[in-house]
Image: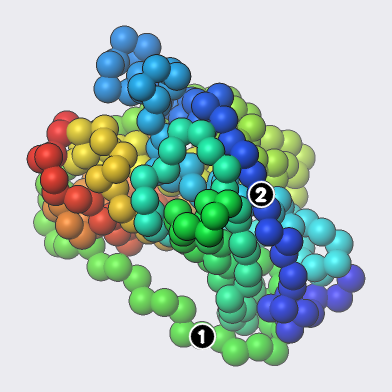
């Protein structure tokens, strides 16, 4: 199928009504690595149904229309698709179980040239069945095999600047060698993260961790460092994906600030490689910061 950006800009997505359970929220949290120490009382509410809490970034996987870029009618070379940026804004705290309606649209497509790709900007809103807005989820996706189609090239949104100097807070969280195989059960079944042959065809020597998993791990670090594990205090979290993470690596999250607008980034410690950059988190100061 021919790549037709105008058709994709007007692509119709049926609203996705999803009822998620306590078990789904626990599985999402386990996929991020929470509960690694079962005696850590701070993490237990995210992985145990008593007094349960939901990780805020779980909003990014709810009401999801599926890996639609793999559909033949899109004309997208899905094996060369990479996540470029992600944003979740919470309009109210996410419940550990409930029903949401996801409404997805392609907002824009930029032509970054044949050597870079086509940059998609996709928005999804999450609502309650009675129409109350829960979250706004935005992502940019680079289709590396579809640049040079003759469209407008930009500009891309300006990046958040990180402060100079040492970070105010640091948190290191390990990942498991099989972490992507667990995380994918929360809905992202892109074989790039499971099948070594597909990973090689995409230019990687082995499956990489989902960008949204790295994103959720950064959220975990912010909850630990700055929110006292109170998810209601985290109102927004934005990142740019700058490099892939390989399952088994340790993620080091560095943050500047303690509340309000906090800047942050994440580094794959073993390679000293920045994997999330230009991060912005909006954190409510109420109740004081916890570590």
- Asked where in the image residue 173 lies, by quadrant, the reply is top left
Q: Position of residue 276 (x, y in %)?
A: 39, 52
Foreground: 188 or 113? 188
Viewer-nearest residue: 76 or 54: 54
Q: Residue at x 26, y 32 (%)?
A: 229
Q: Is residue 199 left or right of residue 290?
A: right
Q: Which residue does the numbered mark 2 point to in the structure image?
A: 17
Q: Determine which quarter of the picture holds residue 20.
A: top right
Is the C terminus in the top left, top right, bottom left or bottom right quadrant? top left
Residue at far right of view:
1
Question: What is the distance, in whole Å, between disc 1 and disc 2 at their CAs?
Answer: 34 Å
Query: Within 10 Å of the Cα at label 1, are there few (<14), some (14-19), or many (20+) other Cα atoms?
Result: few
Residue ID at (57%, 43%): 99
Residue depth check, mark 1 versus mark 2: number of the one nearer the observer: 2
Q: Where, quadrant-wise, is the N terminus in this rendering? A: bottom right
**What residue do we see at 82% from left, 59% from top?**
71
Placement of 28 over or under 76, stated as above or below: above
Q: How many residues crowd mark 2 within 10 Å: few (<14), some (14–19), many (20+)?
A: some
Q: Quadrant of residue 289?
A: top left
Q: Position of residue 86 (x, y in %)?
A: 46, 58
- In percent of width and height, residue 213 lies at 49, 41
Q: x%, y% of residue 193?
A: 64, 40
Residue furthest toward the top?
A: 39
- Image position of 31 (left or right of 258): right
Disc 1: which residue: 154
| Disc 2, SS | strand
- Up the image or down, 111 lies above or below 254; here it is below
């Amino acid at each position: 199928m021919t790549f037709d950006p105008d058709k994709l800009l007007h692509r119709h997505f049926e609203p996705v009504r999803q009822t998620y359970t306590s078990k789904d929220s626990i599985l999402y949290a386990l996929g991020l690595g929470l509960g690694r120490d079962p005696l850590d009382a701070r993490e237990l509410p995210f992985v145990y149904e008593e007094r349960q809490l939901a990780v805020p970034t779980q909003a990014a996987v709810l009401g999801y229309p599926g890996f639609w870029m793999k559909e033949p009618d899109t004309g997208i070379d899905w094996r060369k698709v990479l996540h470029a940026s992600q944003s979740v804004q919470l309009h109210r705290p996410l419940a550990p179980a409930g029903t949401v309606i996801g409404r997805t649209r392609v907002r824009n497509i930029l032509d970054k040239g044949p050597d870079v790709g086509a940059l998609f900007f996709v928005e999804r809103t999450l609502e309650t069945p009675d129409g109350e807005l829960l979250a706004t989820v935005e992502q940019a996706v680079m289709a590396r095999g579809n640049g040079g189609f003759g469209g407008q090239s930009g500009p891309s949104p300006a990046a958040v600047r990180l402060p100079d100097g040492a970070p105010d807070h640091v948190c290191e969280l390990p990942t498991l060698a099989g972490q992507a195989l667990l995380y994918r059960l929360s809905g992202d079944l892109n074989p790039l993260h499971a099948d070594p042959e597909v990973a090689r065809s995409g230019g990687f020597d082995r499956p990489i961790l989902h960008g949204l998993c790295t994103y959720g791990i950064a959220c975990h670090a912010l909850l630990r460092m700055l929110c006292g594990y109170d998810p209601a205090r985290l109102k927004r979290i934005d990142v740019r994906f700058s490099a892939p993470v390989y399952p088994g690596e340790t993620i080091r999250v560095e943050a500047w600030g303690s509340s309000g607008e906090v800047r942050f980034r994440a580094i794959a410690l073993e390679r000293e490689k920045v994997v999330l950059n230009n991060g912005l988190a909006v954190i409510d100061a109420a109740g004081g910061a916890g570590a």
